[in-house]
Image (tube, rainbow, N blue to C red):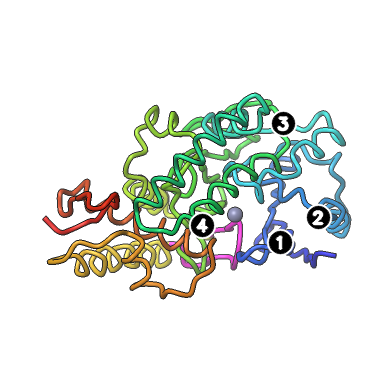
Amino acid sequence: MYKSEFSKNEGVYRFKIDVPFEVKFVCIYLLKIDNKNVLIDAGLNLGDWSKVFFSVLNDAKLNIKDIDYCIISHAHLDHVGLLKKFKRKNPNLQILMHDITNEILKWSTDPENFKEIEISANKMAQEMIKYGISDKQGKRISQFFTSWPKMIRYQKPDMLLHDGDEITFGTNKLKIIWTPGHSFGHICVFDQNKQHLFSGDHILSEITPHIGVFNISPALKDKYNFHNILGNYLESLDRIDKLNPKIIFPGHQKIIYNPHRRILDIKEHHKNRLKEIFDLIVDKPLTPHRISQIHFGEDLDEMNGFLALNEVLSHLIYLEHQDRVKRIEKNDKILFIAN
Ligand SMILES: [Zn+2]
């Protein structure tokens, strides 16, 4: 049974439930605004997770039938899991998500596209092998990308959101800020009266969010020009900083009471990492995988090895867009070197 906890902070209900991933737990938030109940995110659909969620909701003297809106931060499976169940239990519930999040979910969960997803995941694995990972690791990554969409049940949203949308509740408004980086369609939700920000996985208290370089839908990458996703992420951070939120309620980890400081720290982290990676390839070309081994060690398991490669690559691509590094091909591998 997953561990769960309910607390109330600054008027915001926080449901914290364990997940069997490295992030340890997911937080679903509920805010009461002009007599409406608004839920942020929909957790995970795995084992008895939903049972645990409904019971912790009950601890807060609430029922899924009392919920008026559910706003989704992004398309990952620990944030959209229970949408279909929510809608079945409460047909009046209004589900809101960003246009791109809907596009990703609709496309990736349609069995008609599973073959195409498999081909795309294989291509991605081939690309990663060129970046230096082993064939075996490539195969595992391709299996992962082929299998996760099958874990999600698509639920059509009742309303599509776009950057800058405002949802009015009496005298208050929730503002939608599109923050691509961790995921293409990622949004943050800003309570304008209280200046609370619900950040999904865009800003976390202890780790810098994973930047999504690899994606099973290359068509989306072209359509929205997500070719330098770390660049998009850093721009998205600045947009949140400008809002000057008082408190950030993230999808994992601790509530953030000093948002500006946390944003500066994340920016500083990326600045340092850009420099460290650049310094490694000043006079000798290396594959992104080799750089990630130097950086994160050589004994990472397959998933962490993939995340490390992804982290390094997002920085290399950023440097490449600044014309500071270039790629060269040698023996079927791609290496990067400073310009
Ligand atoms: Zn997450």
Beta carbon at label 4 within 8 Å of ligand 1: no
Instruction: Decide if residue 249 is on the left or right side of residue 87.
Output: left
| Mark 4 or mark 2, earlier in chain | 2
Residue drawn 51% across the image and 41% down it: 121
Q: Which residue is mark 2?
A: 49
Q: Position of residue 175 (x, y in %)?
A: 52, 39
Q: Which residue is mark 4?
A: 136
Type of amino acid under label 3: Gln
Q: Which residue is mark 1?
A: 19
Q: Which residue is mark 3?
A: 155
Beta carbon at label 2 within 8 Å of ligand 1: no
Residue drawn 60% across the image and 33% down it: 108
| Mark 1 or mark 4, earlier in chain | 1
Mark 4 to mark 2: distance in Å? 32 Å
Residue at disc 2, secondary structure: helix
Mark 2 to mark 1: distance in Å? 8 Å
* Crowd class of label 1 (few under 14; some 14 to 19; many from 20; radius 10 Å): some
Mark 1 to mark 3: distance in Å? 22 Å
Instruction: Decide if residue 153 is on the left or right side of residue 174.
Output: right
